[in-house]
Image: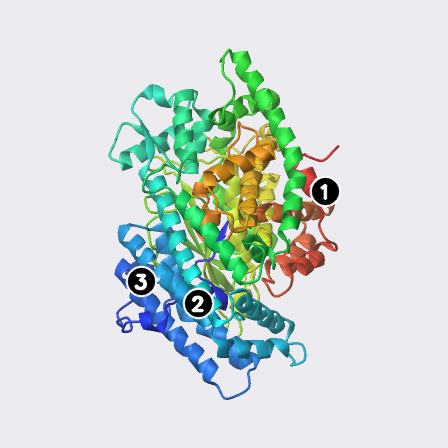
């Protein structure tokens, strides 16, 4: 998943401002967030000088500056032109983008009670200012004038694209509504901002505060040494040395569910994890979800759309919810068939053991490992010792060099400010040694950091006033083990590393003129394609032979083990596809329900029953913890995007296999020229056709997942 901390579209940047009546005196000059970034590489975020108390006044000062700039645009006597309207809108967002970048880092990675209070206070104010700008009739009139003349006024294709994007964003945000509707829309957006903030903070509280602490050695029997060490370190951090803590995060829970032979403890850990946001207490998210859905439905009606899903998908590649549903349903049926076959294999394994059980969701990963060992002579514990976090990072750098010509040079500690000692920074250079950007890496879980893995853009690449290089980051939540010991990860986690690094490379490859069109600022159901396609390089011999090295012996992963991994690559595909699609389908159906009042738990339960959801599998993200969808608008009615993008991913990978293989220079150049470097300067469908020579169908996806008939 990507996460744009620094918005590079004018429309998105407006979400971070406050109406004039809310603006106090400008922030003091000593506030480190107010001034343009200083230091090397065109300036860097002043992470080391920021305090929580700086954020609200800095946001307000930046927004006041943006408001003044917009006032100059609307007061101009000259007729509207691209340069005095659209380009000036781009410039107006820069101060806000700088503050948002740092604000987003701290709220996502360094949250505490004081910062959460700032978030709660600022969220509705920020939404209110966005609406004030979108609803400015004089500003919209100038934008519309440029839009209407865009094809006859000598604009470049990129300028025409930016004009279309700006106009479209304003229309979709209510610029054409009458006064009463605009006032109602603004009230809705403010309330949604407040509710999404509460949702995310409730989820973070459950993930931070809850853990299963194990006191006896027998409770951790069967766990690999690295998993056990990580649990010991987590317990010590909670003030319980000599014990083991299974934290309420995916990176802690899934290894326990995979390896622990203690069925009673597996159930406890599983229930803790799947009930995040659904505990019935102060952090329960169900009432919040009901209100969010009602408000989104009303907003869609105001804007002239049947449902929120129709509004969300309109300018994605799918265009309509029906097309997105069609793809999901085409994959759902064979995925469920495969999942039922997997369950039957696991039940047989349990029966052979004489376990006397019926497979339940907390048994799935444990018995899946037993089946994999029996069918493919492959055990996850065999693979993990070869997957060292730091070696995998080196493998990602190798991939970036071979495919895109990038080299990564580590910066010495202290060369640029960081917000936590765990964070390291690399300079990225091209084959000529020219500076391309900076890459920040924050790999470890800690209190106050949201769960999961993501990419962020602190600064977008641009070239229309002067050359500005990008700053990107990758964030993960691996659990630290003992000091001096390498961090070992699962094959799935290694795949996630390559995926998120793909987002970072998408930002680093950007070569556009205007920041609103740069890097990952593309359609939601296209943005996951560049990241997903790069997952394939993890399993290439060139990566595994060099970087999958045993953490004790230093020996490369044996070829025969790699062969077994390859034979088992589609193993458990039914489970993986069903748990994802269940979340995506529930998301879409929630947002197609319109203004019908919704009880989230009941809707989830009834929808899954109607779909024929295998009872042994739970949604990858249950509704009360679905931060993609309810922690903000980003993936609402759009979680299907990962599957849509994977139709492109599977087809693009076949472009390599049909040519000279994974490292084919010609195919890699086309991928960079038509996908990674162009941002949103062209329609993504056109970009994909330029790369592949045709559109992508579903056949490659079905082959990739093993659902196609042989």
Between 361 and 533, the one lying in front of the other is: 361
- Look at the image and tell me in which quarter the C terminus lies: top right
Q: Is residue 591 visible?
A: yes
Mark seen at residue 55: 3
Q: Secondary structure at mark 2?
A: helix
Gap between marks 1 and 3 measured at Cα:
50 Å
- Identified at 44% across, 44% down, the residue is 452
Q: Which residue is mark 1?
A: 699
Gap between marks 2 and 3 measured at Cα:
28 Å
- Mark 2 or mark 1, which is nearer the start of the sequence? 2
Q: Which residue is mark 2?
A: 183
- Mark 3 or mark 2, which is nearer the start of the sequence? 3
**In the depicted structure, whether residue 619 falls above or below residue 679:** above
Q: Is residue 599 left or right of residue 415?
A: right
The image quarter containing residue 100 is: bottom left
Between 455 and 451, the one lying in front of the other is: 451
- Identified at 49% across, 46% down, the residue is 394
Between 315 and 576, the one lying in front of the other is: 315
Give residue 548's position: percent from left, percent from top: 52, 37
Question: Contact, CB < 8 Å: mark 2 with mark 3?
Answer: no
Q: Secondary structure at mark 3?
A: helix
Most distant residue in the left direction = 239
Q: Is residue 375 left or right of residue 456?
A: right
Between 42 and 401, the one lying in front of the other is: 42
- Mark 3 or mark 1, which is nearer the start of the sequence? 3
Give residue 12's position: percent from left, percent from top: 47, 64
Disc 1 vs disc 2: which is toward the camera?
A: 2
- Identified at 67% across, 59% down, the residue is 687
Give residue 513's position: percent from left, percent from top: 56, 70
């Amino acid at each position: 998943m990507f996460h744009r901390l620094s918005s590079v579209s004018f429309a998105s940047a407006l979400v971070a401002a406050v109406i004039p009546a809310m603006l106090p005196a400008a922030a003091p000059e000593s506030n480190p967030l107010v001034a343009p970034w200083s230091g090397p590489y065109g300036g860097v975020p002043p992470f080391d000088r920021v305090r929580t108390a700086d954020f609200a006044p800095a946001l307000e000062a930046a927004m006041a500056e943006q408001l003044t700039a917009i006032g100059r645009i609307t007061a101009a006597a000259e007729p509207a032109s691209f340069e005095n309207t659209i380009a000036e809108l781009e410039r107006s967002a820069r101060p806000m983008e700088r503050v948002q970048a740092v604000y987003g880092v701290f709220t996502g990675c360094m949250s505490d009670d004081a910062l959460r209070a700032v978030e709660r206070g600022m969220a509705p104010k920020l939404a209110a200012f966005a609406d004030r700008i979108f609803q400015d009739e004089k500003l919209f009139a100038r934008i519309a004038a440029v839009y209407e003349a865009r094809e006859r006024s000598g604009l470049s294709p990129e300028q025409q694209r930016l004009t279309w994007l700006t106009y479209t964003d304003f229309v979709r945000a209510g610029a054409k509504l009458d006064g009463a509707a605009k006032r109602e829309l603004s009230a809705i957006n403010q309330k949604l901002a407040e509710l999404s903030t509460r949702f995310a903070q409730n989820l973070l509280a459950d993930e931070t505060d809850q853990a299963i602490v194990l006191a006896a050695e027998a409770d951790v029997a069967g766990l690999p040494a690295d998993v056990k060490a990580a649990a010991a370190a987590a317990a010590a951090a909670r003030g319980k040395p000599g014990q083991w803590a299974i934290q309420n995060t995916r990176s802690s829970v899934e290894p326990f569910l995979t390896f622990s032979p203690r069925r009673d403890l597996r159930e406890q850990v599983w229930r803790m994890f799947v009930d995040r946001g659904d505990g019935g207490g102060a952090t329960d998210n169900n009432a919040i979800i009901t209100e969010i859905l009602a408000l989104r439905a009303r907003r869609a009606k105001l804007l002239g759309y049947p449902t929120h899903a129709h509004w969300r998908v309109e300018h994605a590649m799918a265009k309509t919810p029906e097309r997105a549903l069609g793809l999901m349903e085409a994959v759902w049926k064979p995925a469920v068939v495969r999942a039922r076959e997997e369950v039957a294999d696991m039940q047989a394994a349990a029966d052979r053991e004489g376990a006397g059980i019926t497979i339940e969701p907390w048994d799935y990963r444990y018995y899946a490992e037993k089946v994999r060992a029996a069918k493919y002579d492959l055990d996850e514990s065999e693979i993990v010792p070869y997957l060292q976090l730091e070696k995998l990072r080196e493998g990602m750098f190798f991939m970036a060099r071979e495919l895109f010509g990038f080299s990564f040079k580590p910066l010495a500690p202290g060369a640029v400010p960081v917000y936590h000692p765990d964070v390291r920074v690399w300079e990225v250079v091209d084959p000529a040694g020219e500076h391309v950007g900076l890459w920040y890496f924050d790999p470890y879980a800690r209190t106050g950091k949201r769960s999961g893995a993501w990419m962020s853009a602190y600064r977008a690449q641009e070239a229309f006033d002067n050359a500005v290089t990008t700053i990107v980051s990758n964030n993960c939540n691996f659990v630290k083990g003992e000091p001096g010991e390498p961090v070992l990860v699962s094959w799935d986690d290694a795949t996630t590393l390559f995926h998120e690094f793909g987002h970072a490379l998408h930002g680093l490859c950007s070569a556009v003129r205007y920041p609103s069109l740069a890097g990952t600022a593309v359609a939601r159901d296209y943005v996951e394609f560049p990241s997903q396609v790069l997952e394939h390089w993890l399993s290439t011999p060139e990566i595994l032979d060099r970087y999958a090295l045993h953490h004790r012996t230093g020996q490369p992963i044996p070829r025969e083990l790699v062969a077994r991994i390859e034979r088992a690559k589609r193993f458990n595909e039914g489970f993986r596809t069903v748990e994802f699609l269940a979340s995506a389908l529930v998301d879409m159906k929630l947002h197609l329900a319109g203004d019908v009042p919704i009880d989230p738990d009941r809707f989830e339960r009834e929808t899954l029953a109607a779909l024929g959801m295998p009872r042994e599998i739970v949604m990858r993200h249950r509704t009360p913890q679905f931060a993609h969808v309810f922690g903000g608008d980003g993936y609402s009615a759009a979680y299907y995007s990962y599957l849509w993008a994977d139709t492109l991913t599977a087809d693009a990978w076949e472009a390599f296999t049909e040519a000279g293989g994974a490292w084919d220079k010609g195919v890699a150049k086309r991928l960079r020229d038509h996908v990674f470097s162009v941002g949103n300067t062209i329609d993504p469908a056109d970009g994909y056709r330029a790369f592949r020579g045709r559109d992508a169908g579903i056949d490659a996806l079905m082959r990739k997942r093993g659902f196609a008939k042989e």
